Image (tube, helix red, strand yellow):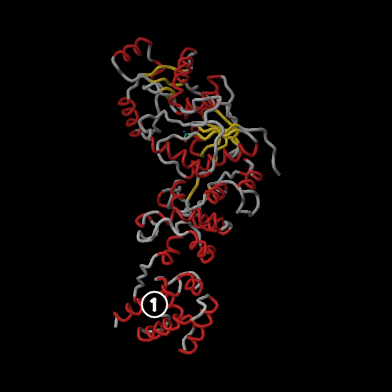
Amino acid sequence: MTTSISPVRVRYAPSPTGIPHIGNIRTALFCWILAKKTKGQFIVRIEDTDRNRYDAEAEKAIFESLNWLGLDWDEGPIKGGPHAPYVQSERKQTYIETAMKLIETGQAYFDDTTPEQLDALRQRQRAAKQPPRYDNRGRYRSKDEIEASREAGLPITVRLRVPEHGSVSFEDTVRGKVTFDLKEIDDFVILKSDEMPTYHLAHVLDDHSMGVTHVIRGDEWISSTPRHLLIHKALEIEPPQYVHVPLILGKDKAKLSKRHGATSALEYRDQGFLPDAVFNFMSLLGWSPGDDTEVMSRDEIIERFTIERINDSPATFDSEKLEWMNGVYIRDMDTERLMDLLIPFMECAESEGGMPDSVKRPIDRNYLRELIPLVHERLKLLTEGTEMLDFFFSDKVEPAAKDIPGRKMDVGLTIDAVAAALKLCRTVSPFEPDQLETAYRSLAEEMGLKPGQLFSPIRVTTTGKTFAPPLFDTMAAIGRARCITRMEHGLEILKSTQ
Ligand code: GLU
């Protein structure tokens, strides 16, 4: 059953401290889908208040990932919108003003505890086997003491005064009711000594002023949520609906990391995955349409998506399934489109996985069009095009002598087979797949070889590979003259081993 839900305002709020990983982009994807589904708005906001960890490359990668996946935003950097600026470092003044208001009402206070003192406190707690937490000492500092510290150039922060007793609860869409005991929560920093807000304060204020209705974010933020609720309470504002989406694990059940392969959307792009396939695959990381359907268009996903169907247990990232799905999308594509996508990979430098540098660029599109039917079914990644097709374009075909003989064939017999195949190659007419097949099948029979025994040395000498597209189509596409040269060269290689 689909619950109809009024238009949401959702946001993707990455911190530009590293290249966004798949889990992070998956929350952006869920937000985007929900915004489309409810005809709401998808907001992008850059949370860059940690100036020490700010990384301009990461910020670039965030936009590149969103663009590559087609997750266009309604409001945010570049695009603008009614709540601009959408970059937190440009909203500094609001956070400072709010922190000061909270100080005036007694709900927050200035604290002059130094990082060294905090370190010492943590060490003492560790030694006493107590959980590390701030001991709220700043509550008891007088105005004069704080002023003196300020004058002495000590770092001054602002902390929220957290009630010592009671609990905070909220109803999470995915997790249900979640309750935290306030005893677990210390007075935490809302404004740092550089007058930048902490994430806790900044995102609460921005979500509120930007009218965010649903905060969809990773599970790792659930333990911070009571702090966010306390800020809402202190400011007497309504919290949004929280939707904490499950972690993504590798197939070994460990948290997804570099060890499991690519971890960022852009790496998948560079490895030859299609944005539509990655989109489809990621939509299933923590969500399911309720039946076994896996391959779905964007429209179908939008149509079937409900936040109620987001799982509360971790999602498993199965890279084989992603490859399979990419193959499905590639098979579904028409030749012209596939060529548009393959050519950039084929044309990049040999050292970057492209065709041998000796192959003329631009790639001959008309010739490629003839070849696509030979590989279309087998392609799973766009990067595989080079490996599957290079011998059509390059004459650098250098098979290893050991790969040339067919099953149970010694070098002598292989030489005879290639020599006979070469002779036939000069005469088959027309040089077309059907004629080639008939001719070579008869040759195998005449020589008392199984067809496969004869075909292997032909394949390896003409393509340089033990595995290639259907042999006779391949030979026809390579053309008689080049087949002859390559078989001659194969013979030389074989003879040199004798
Ligand atoms: N800036 C936080 C991050 O980088 C956002 C967390 C949230 O969505 O509230 O993940």
The residue tagged 1 is: 487
Vertical side of 166 occupied by 265: above or below: below
Evaluate whether residue 496 shows in this view: yes
Which image quadrant: the N terminus?
top right
**Amino acid type at image mark 1:** Met
Report the residue at 70% width, 37% height from top: 4
Report x, y in % for residue 126. 35, 34
For the residue pair 151 and 411, the one nearer the viewer reads as 411
Counting from the top left corner in percent of width and height, residue 328 is at: 56, 58
Decide if residue 146 is on the left or right side of residue 373.
left
SS at circle 1: helix
**Residue at 39% in and 86% down:** 416
Q: Quadrant of the C terminus?
A: bottom left
**Quarter of the rendering containing residue 5:** top right
Q: Quadrant of residue 391?
A: bottom left
The residue depicted at 49 percent of the width and 28 percent of the height is 86
Report the residue that reaches farthest toward the top.
144
**Up-down relation of residue 465 to residue 362 (above or below):** below
Look at the image and tell me whether residue 187 can be seen: no
